[in-house]
Amino acid sequence: MAKTVKRIGVLTGGGDCPGLNAVIRAIVKTADHDYNIDIIGFKDGYEGLIENRFMDISSKNVSGLLAQGGTILGTSNRADPFNFPVLQGDDYVYLDRSSQAVRNFESLGLDALIAIGGDGTMAASAEMAKKGLPIIGVPKTIDNDLVGTDVTFGFDSAVVTATDAIDKIHTTAQSHHRVMIVEVMGRYAGWLALHSGMAGGGDIILMPEFPYDIDAVCDSVRTRNAQGKNFSIVVVGEGARAIGGEMVVHRKVKNSPDAVRLGGISHQVASQIEGLTNIECRVTILGHLLRGGAPSAFDRILATRFGVEALRMVVRGEYGNLVVLNCNKMTSVPLAEVAGKLRLVTAGHSMVTTALSLGICLGSPSNVPFEEFYAEKAEAEAPKS
């Protein structure tokens, strides 16, 4: 039987997204209402645990948080306890501060830690669990790329924001007879591009998992024009790339564990389409708009369910696990099975086959079966031993 839990810590790590505050609210309210557990929140993710920066959180602190975007605790996407950046002179050095984090946890008399974050936070949490830290993970990311859960909170809100933007761009594309290219986040996963592209009536959707054939893209644009549809909407995931090409890196941040910042592929696609079709293109990069604002109703509910279940898992002593949604039920998977993995779009996924049945171009030639085309490309581009 798990020992009595009296005090736990909570942190939000990685990039922000709508729904983080809803999780914090659910944890605090459940702790107060059902278990009489005290909650403290570490500021700026694992950085706060390492530097011993925290705040007490009670039910009165979380009033009104359900609909509020961002996180009252702050967050950081560079606070890996095992690779923590410390400025020495003009340069950063990376140090293992995981033992310091454990000492701070113990000195505060905490019984458990709930870490809310994406793949980077969960990878760090899995390693912290190995050091004996009693930890529960909660999955968040607008990228929807965490393994083990059907969906992450933050994703639906980002899809809603992107869809609204595509709807607005649709009207100006139609008025000016242009190809309008909308670039969305998602890093190495195409879920956000696929969902918002379908919801927004995109004609072409390009995703990181399926390097695109620019001739196929241009053929799709020409076909639409020949049918009297003298505009096209192209939705591009930031990690998309042409066959044989590379992802477009906007910049690199040297003091970040994940130094690569993708962005700008939409301009490359626009240049390629204009050069091959002589049709005017315009680019809109949605960027951090997708992270902001109030969470959707779906994400408010999902975040609340995650928060309540995470607290219950703490009480049951089910440490080292990530709370997940599976077939609309709250369950869990070991953090060790999630760390270092990404959930990507597959060629046979029902969303992909649905898009293809609608005539949406996903970057492959129309005269070659989609799965066959990308099976061949994967084999052709695989590293040679």
Image: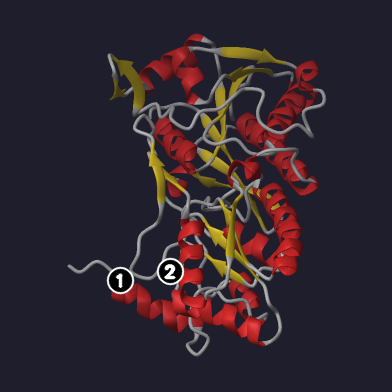
Q: Quadrant of residue 318?
A: top right
Q: Is residue 146 above or below residue 23?
A: below
Residue 14 left/right relative to 93:
right
Callout count: 2
The residue type indicated by label 2 comes to Pro
What residue occupies the far top of the structure in this picture?
107
Q: Residue at horizontal 63%, vertical 13%?
A: 55
Residue 236 left/right relative to 354:
left
Percent x, y for residue 244?
Answer: 33, 69
Q: Residue at horizontal 73%, vertical 52%?
A: 160
The quadrant in which the C terminus is found is: bottom left
For mark 1, give the secondary structure: helix
Whether tag 2 and tag 1 are in contact, CB under 8 A, the answer is yes
Give the residue number, with chain letter if any, for mark 1.
Answer: 381
Instruction: Kindly report the distance in space between the C-alpha atoms of the residues bearing marks 2 and 1.
Output: 10 Å
Q: Is residue 322 above or below residue 92?
A: below
